[in-house]
């Protein structure tokens, strides 16, 4: 009888290879759009690697959710970014449902929400937000600007062409930080009171905890959904406000239903404030705490001074134009 040979030792299993496509990106940005193809294309350009600085070795995901445009926008994907363009499953006058759909699809540990897709980003915005978010409870806000000057006398019908001329005049996109020189700030200084942030970044866990944007804000444009989200985020236990300075988002005119003139904007803001007070039992107020300040390492210092929009004019994020007829 031949001797029994001992069993050969089991070979260790090779570690499973994870493809790059299966790995989550480092940062996700969700934008909502409605009938704003030209402005949205500029926003995507501003978020591309051609324009964004300091993202070496980082993967970025851009998700656009169209909220019921007559036809899907024809877009050039942002260079060097993972990109998805989807139609909202239930388009509505409010962007809230579409925005929450996009947030549910975002895969990164840090997720930013653009309630208005017609906003261009300054060149160091994504890298600065990644660096500023040191903790999963951080509420990272960027500041809001809009192209043009208050009371510049430009008629609504000429506003889009005026924006294009302003951008051409600074050599955008090559001169991304030139945006500050042709824009109006929506807050009094980088550490002044803020009502909302168009580009708000939270950890995936904090977004889930808050339940995203509240669907109760179902009116055209979303009403106070955006400032409400910021208020709730800062009221959650253990959260910390982090302001990113030296960067911002810049609103382009796109024919919004309440952004055509001062009178309509003022009335819209009054209506929004009344409904918010009825829903939340408190007035719609600006956040005055400064919080922790993170100065972008990429921004030139100092920026050309941007004037402050009069308080009586509704910030463009409350004029998103997301309302559908």
Image (tube, rainbow, N blue to C red):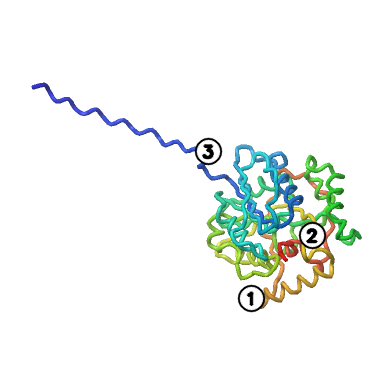
Q: Residues within 10 Å of mark 2 (few under 14, many from 20)?
A: some
Find numbered disc 3 in the image and state the secondary structure of the residue it sits on: helix
Residue 207: x percent and y percent?
56, 59
> Mark 2 highlights which residue?
255
Above or below 26: residue 186: below
**Mark pair 1, 3: CA separation:** 45 Å
Q: Quadrant of residue 9?
A: top left
**Mark pair 2, 3: CA separation:** 40 Å
Above or below 162: residue 285: below
Residue at 66% from the left image edge and 45% from the top image edge: 127
Residue 183: x percent and y percent?
82, 53
Instruction: Please report whichever mark, 1 or 2, sits nearer to the chain's N-terminal start.
Output: 2
Residue 279: image tag:
1
Give the mark toward the camera: 1 or 2: 2
Q: Quadrant of residue 310?
A: bottom right
Residue at 65% from the left image edge and 64% from the top image edge: 92
Q: Quadrant of the C terminus?
A: bottom right
In the rendered structure, the answer to whether residue 249 lies left or right of residue 60 reads right
Q: Residue furthest right?
A: 153
Find numbered disc 2 in the image and state the secondary structure of the residue it sits on: loop
**Along the viewing direction, whichever of 285 and 97 lies nearer the viewer:** 97
> Mark 3 highlights which residue?
20
Residue 223: x percent and y percent?
69, 68
Find numbered disc 1 in the image and state the secondary structure of the residue it sits on: helix
**Along the viewing direction, whichever of 225 and 221 lies nearer the viewer:** 221
**Mark pair 1, 2: CA separation:** 28 Å
Residue 132: image tag:
none
Q: Quadrant of the N terminus?
A: top left
Q: Residues within 10 Å of mark 3 (few under 14, many from 20)?
A: few
Give the mark toward the camera: 2 or 3: 2
Instruction: Please report whichever mark, 1 or 3, sits nearer to the chain's N-terminal start.
Output: 3
């Amino acid at each position: 009888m031949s001797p029994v040979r001992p069993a050969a030792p089991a070979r260790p299993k090779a570690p499973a290879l994870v493809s790059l496509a299966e790995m989550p990106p480092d940062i996700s940005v969700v934008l909502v759009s409605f009938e704003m193809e030209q402005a949205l294309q500029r926003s995507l350009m501003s978020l591309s690697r051609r324009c964004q600085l300091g993202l070496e070795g980082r993967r970025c995901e851009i998700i656009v959710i169209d909220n019921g445009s007559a036809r899907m926008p024809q877009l050039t994907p942002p260079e060097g970014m993972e990109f998805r363009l989807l139609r909202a499953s239930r388009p509505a006058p409010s962007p809230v449902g579409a925005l929450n759909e996009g947030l549910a699809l975002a895969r990164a540990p840090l997720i930013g929400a653009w309630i208005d897709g017609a906003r261009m980003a300054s060149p160091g915005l994504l890298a600065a937000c990644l660096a500023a978010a040191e903790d999963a409870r951080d509420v990272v806000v960027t500041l809001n600007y809009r192209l043009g000057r208050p009371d510049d006398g430009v008629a609504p019908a000429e506003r889009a062409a005026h924006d294009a001329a302003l951008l051409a005049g600074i050599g955008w996109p090559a001169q991304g930080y030139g945006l500050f020189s042709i824009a109006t700030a929506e807050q009094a200084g980088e550490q002044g009171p803020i009502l909302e942030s168009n580009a708000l970044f939270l950890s995936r866990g904090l977004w889930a905890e808050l339940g995203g944007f509240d669907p109760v804000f179902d009116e055209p444009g979303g009403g106070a959904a955006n400032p409400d989200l910021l208020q709730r985020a800062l009221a959650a236990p253990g959260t910390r406000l982090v302001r990113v300075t030296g960067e911002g988002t810049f609103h382009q005119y796109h024919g919004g239903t309440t952004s055509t003139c001062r009178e309509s904007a003022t009335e819209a803001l009054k209506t929004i404030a009344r409904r918010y007070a009825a829903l939340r039992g408190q007035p719609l107020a600006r956040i005055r705490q400064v919080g922790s300040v993170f100065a972008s390492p990429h921004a030139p210092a100092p920026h050309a001074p941007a004037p402050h929009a009069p308080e009586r004019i509704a910030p463009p994020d409350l004029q998103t134009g997301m309302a559908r007829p």
